[in-house]
Image: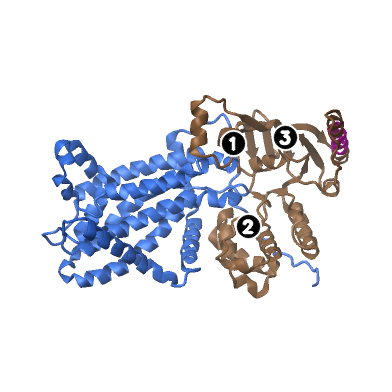
Chain colours: A blue, B brown
């Protein structure tokens, strides 16, 4: 092989990495940190897009059925729960597969996003030690990639809906609005666990079990109103209030409202007031998560 | 950005004053919650370690600075601080211009993506504008010289091909300030010669260069100043020739001291490779 050097065209392109000015004494305030997080995302939106594309592509390979899993996965999960609940519980809810599918679909998105985000930063440790880039793009990309899974999940949802034509309504078009609220909330959780896992590598185990517990405490397999018949809730209304304040109580009830309706009634609009409160709370939570992440970020390269 | 740092004037590419990088060993490496919790409960003092301390340096425009020293002296930490990867725990650092570190051979590669897709991903990590990355793409593809493999997923690549692609991406931008950390150690002989040419080209084009290496020939040939770092402190600074000589002497003394200590402890000295 000839060792002739193929020269580059002289290019004026330079790295966009800004000139560094660091003063160890300088301590950015909370607002600076949030602003930093926002400008990170805006300046690196292309990077987020590439990471999301890579993530989606990766999920399609190395499996026999490839992208078919996007569709099969929620269906199989639904089948498991239908069998489980039908055997254990004596209460019979009409059109139960659709009832729980309305919760399984968003929940699967949430758990996948949070679990992927947990490892999103540490899995890039080689890179973090070698290039200065805003690490916040990593959990954001992991969460955003989950949106695609959710969108694919709408296919099996459509199939199931065909079995219950009475439940099909115009309110289905509201799903993206509810999903948008969920996205903001998920993003906040993802950013927090991604930063935390850098310092505590066993956070992933904790997260996995907490997620499972969270699902059973949320009205996914049951309706929020079913809690009223439980003695504990009647004796201590505070538990009932807390259960309703669970973000996934709001989200599940909203999704179920537009997809399934109620046990006795047809689908209807979600509780806008609850959704609005959750959205505002999630935005504040997201700002907090971004602040924590930016505060911890300078230490990542040292700890990894 | 201020026009001066602590009253010093313009004209430098890099100015660092009293830099210190402290590692908190409580959070070092894969700690579990249990260990941290038990440490906090037992009020065990937090172990700290200064990888760099009281380091001040100036790199003027047009200068090429070599950083040498024994393993673990803090050379790479210094480069990481200059590249903005690690924020200093104390001191002030001012770096002017676009920084590019050739610390990055093959980092950030995605096994499932093709070579071409990895180039765009790598460019995005480096902070390149997408239009710029796409404009650079043909040049990088040509330089990496991977043939049809450029459209194959990276998992099909040999380690040499990976190194070639990594080098092509990392050197595709012309930075103002170039940070090099032992980049010439990879690849086969042909590629090493080719990459040396390219590095020299970059060194020629950059406004300032900071180089970490164990290759003393490089230091004497291509650098006009050198810095000797030992145990996180700058020990000597000056002409490359002098510094290299001092470094050799220090290394010899250190070896003798170790042998002496081992002899006194009654342990047979380990024969150096």
- Magenta segment boundaries in residue numbering: B246-258
Could you tell me which chain the residue with mark 1 belongs to? A
Q: Please count the marks in the image.
A: 3
> Which quarter of the rendered picture does the N terminus of chain A lie within?
bottom right
Q: Going 34% across and 41% down the picture, which residue do you hit?
A: A284
Location of mark 1 (residue): A22
Chain bearing mark 2: A
Q: Are marks 1 and 3 on the same chain?
A: no
Local packing at callout 2 (Cα closer than 10 Å; few below 14, some 14-19, many 20+) is some
Determine if residue A188 is in view.
no
Q: Nearer the viewer, residue A193 or A238?
A: A238
- Of the 4 image quadrants, the one containing the C terminus of chain A is top right
The residue beneath circle 2 is: A13
Task: Evaluate whether label 2 is on the same chain as label 3.
Answer: no
- Residue under label 3, please give it: B57
Please give left or right for residue B151 compared with residue B190 in the image: left
Question: Does the segment drawn in magenta span residue B165?
Answer: no
Tell me the crowding category of disc 1: few under 14, some 14 to 19, or many 20 or more residues within 10 angstroms, Cα based. Answer: many
Of residue B155 and residue A134, the one placed in the foreground of this image is B155
Q: Nearer the viewer, residue A236 or A151?
A: A236
Residue B247: within the magenta?
yes
- Label 1 to label 3: alpha-carbon separation: 14 Å
Looking at the image, the residue that sits furthest to the left is A264
């Amino acid at each position: 092989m000839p060792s002739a050097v193929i020269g580059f065209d002289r290019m004026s392109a330079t790295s966009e990495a800004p000139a560094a000015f660091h003063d160890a004494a300088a301590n950015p305030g909370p607002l600076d940190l949030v602003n930093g997080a926002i400008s990170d995302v805006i300046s690196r939106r292309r990077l987020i897009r590439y990471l999301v594309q890579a993530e989606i592509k990766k999920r399609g390979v190395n499996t026999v059925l490839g992208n078919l899993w996007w569709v099969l996965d929620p269906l199989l999960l639904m089948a498991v729960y239908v069998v489980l609940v039908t055997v254990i519980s004596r209460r019979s809810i009409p059109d139960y597969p659709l009832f729980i599918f309305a919760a399984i679909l968003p929940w699967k998105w949430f758990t996948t996003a949070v679990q992927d985000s947990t490892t999103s930063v540490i899995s890039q440790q080689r890179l973090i030690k070698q290039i200065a880039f805003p690490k916040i793009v990593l959990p954001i990309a992991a969460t955003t990639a989950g949106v695609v899974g959710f969108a694919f999940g709408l296919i099996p949802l459509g199939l199931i809906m065909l079995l219950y034509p009475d439940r099909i309504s115009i309110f289905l078009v509201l799903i993206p609005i509810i999903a948008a609220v969920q996205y903001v909330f998920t993003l906040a959780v993802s950013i927090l666990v991604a930063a935390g896992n850098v310092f505590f590598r066993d956070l992933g185990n904790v997260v996995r079990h907490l997620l499972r517990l969270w699902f059973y405490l949320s009205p996914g397999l049951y309706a929020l109103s079913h809690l009223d018949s439980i003695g504990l809730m009647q004796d201590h209304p505070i538990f009932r209030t807390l259960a309703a304040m669970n973000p996934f109580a709001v989200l599940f009830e909203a999704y179920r409202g537009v997809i399934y309706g109620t046990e006795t009634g047809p689908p209807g609009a979600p509780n806008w007031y609850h959704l609005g409160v959750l959205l505002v709370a999630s935005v504040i939570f997201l700002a907090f998560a971004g602040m924590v992440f930016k505060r911890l970020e300078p230490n990542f390269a040292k700890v990894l | 950005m201020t026009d001066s740092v602590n009253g010093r004037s313009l004209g430098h590419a890099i100015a660092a004053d009293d830099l210190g990088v402290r590692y908190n060993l409580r959070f070092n490496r894969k700690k579990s919650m249990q260990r941290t919790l038990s440490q906090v409960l037992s009020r065990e003092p937090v172990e700290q370690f200064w990888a760099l301390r009281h380091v001040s340096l100036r790199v003027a425009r047009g200068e090429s600075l070599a950083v040498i020293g024994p393993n673990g002296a803090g050379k790479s930490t210094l480069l990481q601080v200059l590249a903005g990867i690690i924020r200093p725990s104390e001191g002030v650092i001012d770096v002017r211009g676009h920084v590019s570190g050739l610390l990055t051979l093959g980092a950030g590669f995605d096994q499932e993506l093709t070579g071409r897709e990895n180039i765009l991903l790598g460019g995005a990590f480096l902070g390149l504008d997408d239009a710029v990355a796409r404009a650079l793409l043909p040049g990088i593809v040509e330089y990496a010289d991977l043939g049809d493999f450029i459209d194959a997923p990276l998992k099909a690549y040999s380690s040499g091909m990976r190194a070639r692609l990594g080098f092509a991406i990392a050197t595709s931008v012309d930075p103002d300030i170039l940070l090099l950390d032992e980049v010439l150690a990879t690849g086969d002989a042909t590629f090493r010669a080719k990459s040396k040419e390219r590095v020299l080209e970059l060194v020629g084009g950059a406004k300032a260069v900071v180089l970490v290496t164990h290759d003393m020939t490089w230091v004497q040939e291509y650098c006009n100043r050198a810095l000797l770092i030992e145990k996180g402190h700058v020990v000597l600074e000056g002409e490359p020739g002098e510094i290299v000589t001092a470094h050799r002497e220090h290394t010899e003394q250190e070896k003798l001291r170790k042998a002496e200590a081992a002899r006194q402890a009654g342990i047979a000295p380990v024969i150096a490779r």
